[in-house]
Image: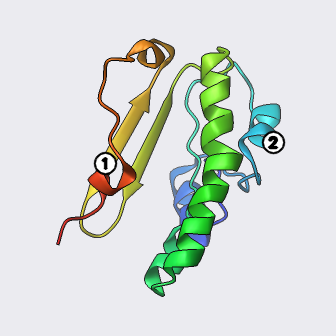
Amino acid sequence: MWSNDDFARALTLLCGINHRKSPDTAESWLRQVDSSTENQLIVLDDLLNNEKYNDAYQWRENLKKLEKDWFLPLYTALKNNRIHSVRISSVNEKFSHDFFVKPSSLWKFWSTIKPLSFYADKP
């Protein structure tokens, strides 16, 4: 598990799972990870704090940073077969949504692309 969160670290210690601090970018993570290891869990909670304080601008800026530093490099790594799959789980107190992508998913050009607002909690 890769996380900067103290609670997540405590859970890994309790379960006897290896824990490391999250790197700043996916490229940095890809350089550190052993390619023979199957499953990795990375907790990216950069959007959490600003959402709590209703700072929409900073939340959007953090989302753009996640896109640049994590999602785009992971997409590229998936496309170049550096990793086998990516599962992104978005969770809050009201709902959760999982996005699972593997190389064959990249060929699904007929799939409808939905905007992020589609996955947002509806009032």
Q: Is residue 68 left or right of residue 121?
A: right
Q: Residue at x 59, y 76 (%)?
A: 58
Callout 2 environment at 10 Å: few (<14), some (14 to 19), or many (20+)? few
Determine whether, in the image, residue 2 is placed left or right of residue 53.
right
> In this view of the protein, can residue 18 be seen by the observer?
no
* Numbered circles on residues, count: 2
Residue 115 placement (x, y as % from top left): 36, 47
Which residue position is annotated with label 2?
Answer: 28
The answer to which image quadrant residue 64 occupies is bottom right
Pointer 1 residue: 97
Q: Is residue 114 above or below residue 43?
A: above
Three-letter residue code for mark 2: Ser
Residue depicted at 64% across the width and 14% down the height: 81
The answer, for residue 16, to whether it is visible in the render is yes
Ranked by sequence position, the earlier of labels 1 and 2 is: 2
Q: Residues within 10 Å of mark 1 (few under 14, many from 20)?
A: few
The answer to which of 76 and 9 lies nearer the viewer is 76
Q: CA distance from mark 1 to mark 2?
A: 26 Å
Give the residue at x 81% y 42%: 28
Where residue 10 sits, quadrant-wise, is bottom right
